Amino acid sequence: MKAIRLLLVDDDPLVRAGLSFMMGGADDIEIVGEAADGGEVEALVDRTRPDVVLMDIRMPTVDGLAATERLRRRQDAPQVVVLTTFHADEQVLRALRAGAAGFVLKDTPPADIVDAVRRVAAGDPVLSPTVTRRLMEQAAGGPADTRRGTARDRIAVLNDREREVAVAVGRGASNAAIAAELYMSVATVKTHVSRILAKLGLNNRVQIALLTYDAGLLEEDGH
């Protein structure tokens, strides 16, 4: 089985050492590099080709938000998991909007951080529905009414079935749960999600959730 290639980015050498020790014990994860600042990330990604980047948000020169935005604009972008000390930090939300696949708290148990890296490498966002809602309620950006109008215009390109799937993703439902709810196969759900991402120009399910929230679709949803 191919190991998950992981890049660690944190300005605190003790944190990096702890993460390295923690991840080094997993047979299926290979640490391919470490960086102390977001400004080093792109060159390291070119050199090491990681599958996942574990990225601290607060760094002195180039922060994790700017580094995430730069990475996610690339054609060959690795998945990014944001490291933070806050549950509902505005910067975390901005990182998710930029394309991060999720976030973990620095005080998260080691086994859970390892699991988060595995899940993101497999294409699953690392956010519980409860945390997603709390973050979205703190939505950063322009006025809510402006966001809503813009989001509704974007959502309008989806057909009715895709819209139903998008709302279910916004609630934090898994593919299996969506399949059961909408009477379709898991494979069909995955196809719909892929089409939604392509039509809306989004990176991952977290961004679908944020857009459905901005459009007010979760408020209208009967679940």
Image (tube, rainbow, N blue to C red):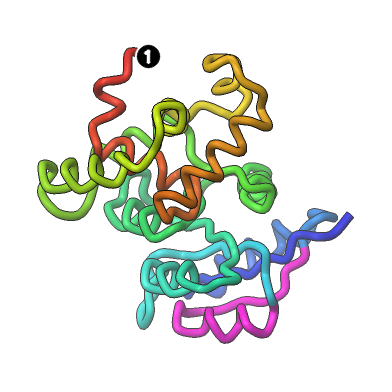
Q: Is residue 111 magenta?
A: no
- Count of numbered marks: 1
| 39 relative to 94 in the view: left or right | right
Q: Tell me what residue is drawn at x 24 percent, y 37 percent.
A: 215
Quadrant containing the C terminus is: top left
From this view, report whether residue 181 is shown above or below residue 25.
Answer: above
Secondary element at image label 1: loop
Looking at the image, which is closer to me, 122 or 34? Answer: 122
Which residue is found at the position 56% from the left and 45% from the top?
194
Residue 135 seen: no
- Mark 1 neighbour class, 10 Å CA radius: few under 14, some 14 to 19, many 20 or more: few
Residue 56 image point, x, y percent: 46, 65
Look at the image and give the residue range highlighted in magenta. Answer: 30-48
Q: Work out whether residue 28 or residue 167 is closer to the camera in this orientation and state it.
A: 167
Give the residue pinned by disc 1: 223
The image quadrant where one finds the N terminus is bottom right
- Please give left or right for residue 156 compared with residue 64 in the image: left
- The correct choice, above or below, for 26 with respect to 67 in the image is above
